[in-house]
Image (cartoon, rainbow, N blue to C red):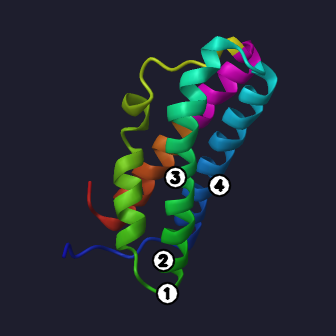
Amino acid sequence: MIVTQAIPQPVAERYLTALKGLVSTVRSALGTAGSAPQSSGWRKKMLPLLESRLAESKTALAHHAIGDQEPLISIALKSRSLARDMDGYSLGFAGEALATQFEDRRRLVVFAAWQVCESAGVV
């Protein structure tokens, strides 16, 4: 077990909020794209990955609320490499506005994940 520092609640919540925003943007883009062939990889791989991380993050925040921050640290450590995990996937097929929003929100998730890890003293 790694000895960590306490993660402030606002930092933990910021991470969850950023991840919710990213998932929302992807869902909007896929709704806009309809059955466009470019959306297939998103539907089969990326959206399930993001939804899984979101579910894990919600559970991790519940653990954090009762003093167990290990699940939050674990999921945040994974999310720091989100850009690499999503390399080659663009939402350009859904229009420039959603593609830009996706990039911005992905950066917010990575930054918020880094803040969680930094607060815990694991980076």
Asked if labels 1 and 2 touch by Cβ distance under 8 angstroms, the answer is yes
Read off the residue under disc 3: 52
Of labels 2 and 3, earlier in sequence is 3
Whole-Å distance between the Cαs marked 2 and 1? 5 Å
Of labels 3 and 4, earlier in sequence is 4
Q: Mark 2 or mark 3, which is nearer to you?
A: 3
Badge 3: how crowded within 10 Å, few (<14), some, or many (20+)? few
Q: Amino acid at mark 1?
A: Ile
Classified by dominant secondary structure, the portion drawn in magenta counts as helix
Q: Position of residue 67 (x, y in %)?
A: 44, 85
Q: Is residue 98 above or below residue 52?
A: above
| Quarter placement of the C terminus | bottom left
Residue at 75% across / 13% down in the picture?
95
Q: Mark 3 or mark 4, which is nearer to you?
A: 3
**Tag 3's secondary structure?**
helix
Single out the residue that lies furthest toward the bottom: 66
Q: Which residues are magenta?
A: 94-106
**Tag 2's secondary structure?**
helix
Of labels 4 and 1, earlier in sequence is 4
Residue at 53% across / 65% down in the picture?
12
Q: Is residue 68 above or below residue 45?
A: below
Q: Amino acid at mark 4?
A: Thr
Read off the residue under disc 2: 64
- Which label belongs to residue 17? 4
Residue at 55% across / 77% down in the picture?
62
Q: Amino acid at mark 3?
A: Ser
